[in-house]
Amino acid sequence: YFQNFINSELKPNMIRSMCCRLQLDLRELLKRGNGLFGSAEQTGSLGVVTINCARLGHICRGDEAALLRRLDHLLDLGKTSLEIKRKVIQRHMDEGLFPYTKRYLGTLRNHFSTLGVNGVNEMIRNFTSDEHDITSEWGYAMAIRLLDHVRARMLEFQDETGHMYNLEATPAEGTTYRFAKEDRKRYPDILQAGTTDMPYYTNSSQLPVGFTDDPFEALERQDDLQRKYTGGTVLHLYMTEPLSSPDACRTLVRRALSSFKLPYITITPTFSICPRHGYLGGKHEFCPKCDDELIARKQRAAALPTTQQELA
């Protein structure tokens, strides 16, 4: 995992990493001066509400105004649920039901309420009857409009409630499958990724799985989208070939972060595991070391009768 402090507006003292992708922008917190020496360590995400964008695209096919109205309704529900959660947890803290928080936390006023999106690629596919997806120019522009709309609503929520909101590219490891299974039951003709038995939605506003093996094409197509998230995001770069050395990885990371402004990337080299020989660099359907040993045994077995005949 590599945070971009080279070519983005981020500075190391502005960001607090909470997990694999949740990134809290501390500039708002620093204005409040919380924590030891105003260091803003008393923060976190109160909770995450994830919007099923694929269903929005299916229900509101061809009508973007209707899609945004329905999105606004879901965002309002998300805000209400997070505000209720904030009140309940704060009341429990005040009444001593969370005694472990008394010394180090005390209040939730510096915690963010997080909204997230999932299945933006499938939203575009359903909205356009599969004429476009997020890789097309039109679909890309629609994804930008969607994220800009959510960001604008979050500013309204902050002014309305006095609490901080952020937009996260929700990891949705289980949610993406659950959303897809529920939608398959309710809308049998909805467009999804995966198979009939194992459907899923593309994570947040990511490219479709397997769309490109070129990490720099992925960076080019995702740079502006990734920068829309205020509560954390990460772009996974999957290498189709093994990295030759740590220096090669360092060069790749520096080149990527110097050329693009997205906040967070990961480098995932492709490797295989053999039960006998362990780690193997690159993708292998069969272990080359096992193959070499098998060939050597067969060659020895083939040569053995000839040797016996010569001895006779």
Image (spheres, helix red, strand yellow):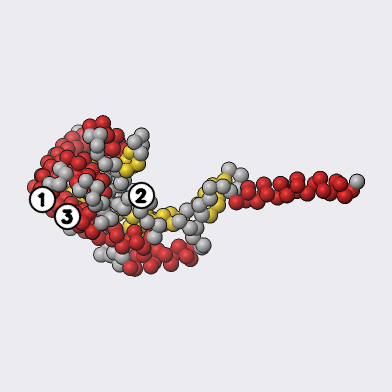
Give percent across and percent down for residue 239. 44, 57
Of circles 3 and 1, which is in front? 3
Closer to viewer: mark 2 or mark 1: 2
Q: Secondary structure at mark 3?
A: helix
Q: Which residue is mark 3?
A: 145
Q: Is residue 266 above or below residue 55?
A: below
Q: Residue furthest top?
A: 185
- From the top left corner, tell me how far across and down residue 109 is, in percent: 18, 46
Q: Residue 281: image x %, image y %?
A: 53, 55
Which residue occupies the extreme right position in the image? 312
Identify residue for label 2.
Answer: 209
In the rendering, which numbered label is found on residue 156?
Answer: 1
Alpha carbons under labels 2 and 1: distance apart: 34 Å
- Under mark 3, the amino acid is Arg
Q: First in sequence: mark 2 or mark 1?
A: 1
Residue 105, percent across and down? Answer: 25, 44
The vertical placement of 133 against 54, above or below, is: below
Q: Few, some or many C-alpha atoms within 10 Å of disc 1 (few <14, some 14-19, many ≥20)? A: few
Residue in the image at 29% along x and 34% along y:
181
